[in-house]
Image: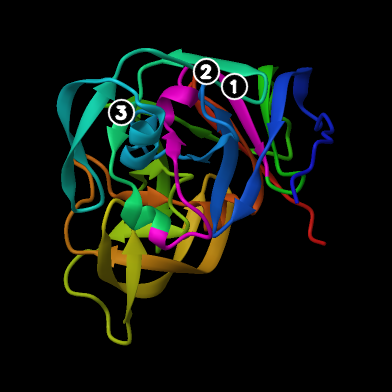
Amino acid sequence: MLSSAWLVPAGTVGGPASSFPFAFRDGLIWVSVRVPPARPPLNFLLDSGAGVSALSSAAARHLGISLTDSVLVHGVHTQSVGYWTTPLVATVGAVPLRQRFLVVDLEGFSRRCHCAVDGLLGADFFRHRVVQLDFEAEQVRLLARAAPTATRTVLPLASRNGALLLPIRVNGGRPQWARLDTGCASALEWVRDGPPPPGVVPRVSIGLAEITIPQTRSTVELGGALFEHVPTGLHAMRIFPGESGLLGSALLSRFTVTVDAPAGRLILDRRRPR
């Protein structure tokens, strides 16, 4: 059930400028987006791992949206062709979205979810905002600004080639850049060093296409927060150039997450155990 109530957490300055509910299902963050003349609202994923916001091919056809330039779209070890829309006026909650969307085929994604994926709100949604994800209250809050406290973990957040990246340590190794990916339902997808260790099992990973990868468990350090036995997908090659992996919602959902892209930082506030 979607909750419409919110509380201002400690360390938040000025309260939320706006907020809207989400549903955390299938390990993914679902939000309702209105794109006139569509009724009812469309089902979007809040996907910080996507460089730009996208609209599914099926939704674009249903809405009769005009398409313009084509572009090559890179996914997890896949690529496809997408098309830009003309500028659209959409809303998520009371937040206006006036922009072009990239139209891509999301049918493979939809088949593995409880309902059709009509689109994605990508990293461009986060880039000029302070966005807080409260997984306990199932609320997205857009903050005027956020002040970290002594009880929070703060990591640097870099924006490179349209992606939001943070440094993490895996199995005691050196810090490496991983993509902040709320559109990844797993905890961690990582580039392995050498052959997969013994005892790994295959698992199907879903992005723009289905792929099967080895699965193991790792120790992951986020700033001063240490997590053991984290389920980890092992990739033989880099998913994206200059990046060592994806940090997904299965691990991020253990926190209240504040993505402060304008200040170049990620603030993680550990959720209280129930």
Number of marks: 3
What amino acid type should be assigned to the residue bearing mark 1?
Val
| Residue appearing at x 80%, y 36% in the figure | 4
Considering the numbered disc 2 on the image, is that residue within a helix, a strand or a loop? loop
Residue designated by label 2: 263
Real-space CA distance between mark 3 and mark 2, rounded to the nearest whole angstrom = 27 Å
Query: Residue 117 got which mark?
Result: none
Query: Residue 130 got which mark?
Result: 1
Considering the numbered disc 3 on the image, is that residue within a helix, a strand or a loop? strand
What amino acid type should be assigned to the residue bearing mark 2?
Ala
- Mark yes or no: residue 164 visible: no
Q: Is residue 16 left or right of residue 52?
A: right
Quarter of the image where the C terminus is located: bottom right
Residue designated by label 3: 102
Q: Position of residue 14 (x, y in %)?
A: 78, 14
Q: Is residue 29 magenta?
A: no
Q: Is residue 62 left or right of residue 242?
A: right
- The residue range painted magenta reads 111-134
> Looking at the image, is mark 3 or mark 1 earlier in the sequence?
3
Q: Residues within 10 Å of mark 2 (few under 14, many from 20)?
A: some
Above or below: residue 42 compared with residue 254: above
